[in-house]
Amino acid sequence: MIRLSQRLAALKGYPMAEIPAIKRRLVEAGVDVIDTGPGDADYPPPAEVITTLQRAVENPAMSKYGFQQGLPAFRRAATDWMRRRFGLEFDPVTELLPLIGSKDGLAHLPFAVLDPGDVAIIPEPGYQAYIGGTVLAGGEPYIYPLTARTGFLVELDEAPTELLRRTRLLFLNYPNNPTAAIAPLDYLERTVATCRRHGIVLAYDNPYCDLTFDGYRAPSIFEVSGAREVAVEFFSMSKSFSMTGWRLGWAAGAPHFIQALNRVKSYVDTGPFLAVQQAAVTALDNAERLIPPVVAELTRRRDAAVAALRREGFALESPRGAMYLWVALPEGVGSAQFARHALERHGVVTLPGVGFGPAGEGYFRIALTVSPERLVEAAGRLGAALAEVRGVEVGVK
């Protein structure tokens, strides 16, 4: 029998991988399913971005290999956007790298940073690309549980000193998926200082920086003094512009970090589709006009869903960033059990907290990817599901 690698075996399967199959079966049976699972909005990309893509596809030059250089106009548009959004200057040639979605760069950075035995600190619950890239690169993941006690922040000062000496990589993501937590600027300053002191590369995953509410403005990590010495920041076209399936993002950082990631990627891919990069130019050049309506709609959805879930007895904060609600379950109610019951009996797709790692147990995530009315309907169904699950657990028939 052929033996597969130990690194592959170390990657745990997603505990609710059967959700798509269950959803398909229910839909085929005529069940009205409300899908709040994946962070994939129901509204389309901006019409002018689609038009640019259509025109670009008709240009034969756009069907050629882009390689890691990509489309110079996209590099320019990304650095121009960072200048307008954060007041930061980056060289579009040496300090930026187009990615096949930010997940691509996040998963491949460990190959450029870690040697076998080096530690990467992984927040949990968190994005599975962090631990996947670390394990496949031969690094040693150290799971840092995110809890309400610390505001769902990774507090490096609480990590053992010996661990920090062995740590070469830290993943952070604020506004956060799945908890929707945000990071105060003084926290980021402390974290950058610790990374500089211990020689830790900080992978700052920032795809939700423009999806913020109630006057909150999410910063770039590079607004922190000294961050360019240690940080690589990852941005995505997926969330702000509803371009999830188009697979385009970028990494920004000091030239030696970008060169290292570029070298890794040159062995595994030939860059994002050039026509998509051309379409992204239109999106980024018009971001100040295109993004506010998205934020306004997400605010409506957030407010409607939070109020409805609270009426059903769920405990949750009203988030100031990202596009998710992180909803607490009563003690003793398993998140996978609850998610399965809510789907099979009530036709609502959620993601169980345990699906983001064991530290996510006790919560479930709702994505604000359907209308306010559908979110209110989903909340009512979830309330009924919770009552049923709790009734079973206490022996009520």
Image (cartoon, rainbow, N blue to C red):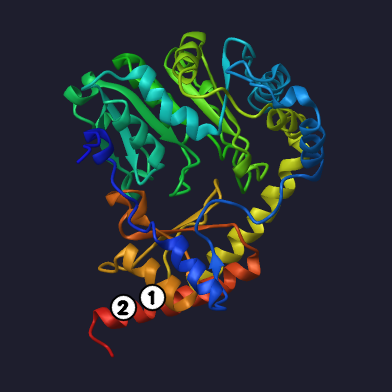
Question: Is 184 or 25 nearer to us in this picture?
Answer: 25
Residue 296: x and y in percent read 70, 52
Q: The residue tagged with tag 1: helix, strand or loop?
A: helix
298 is higher (above) or lower (below) than 154: below
Few, some or many C-alpha atoms within 10 Å of disc 1 (few <14, some 14-19, many ≥20)? Answer: many
Determine whether 367 is above or below 77 in the image: below
Q: Give how far apart the Cα atoms at labels 2 and 1 are.
A: 6 Å
Identify the residue position indicated by label 1 in the image: 386
The residue under the point 48% across, 41% down is 182
- Does residue 199 lie above or below 84 as drawn? above
Residue 46, quarter of picture: top right
**Callout 2 amino acid:** Arg
Residue that carries the numbered disc 2 in the rendered image = 390
Q: Secondary structure at mark 2?
A: helix
Farthest front residue in view: 1
On the image, the x and y values in percent for residue 195 come to 35, 20
| Identity, as a three-letter code, of the amino acid under mark 1 | Leu
Side of 347 relative to 135 (left or right)? right
Which quadrant of the view contains residue 353?
bottom left
Going 28% across and 90% down the picture, which residue do you hit?
A: 397
Q: Residue at 55% x, 73% y: name it.
A: 28
Tell me if label 2 and label 1 are in contact, CB under 8 Å. yes
Residue with the most extreme bottom position: 397
Image location of residue 324, percent across then percent down: 51, 53
Viewport quadrant of the N terminus: top left
**How dense is the environment of label 2, judged by Cα within 10 Å: few (below 14), some, or many (20 and up)?**
some
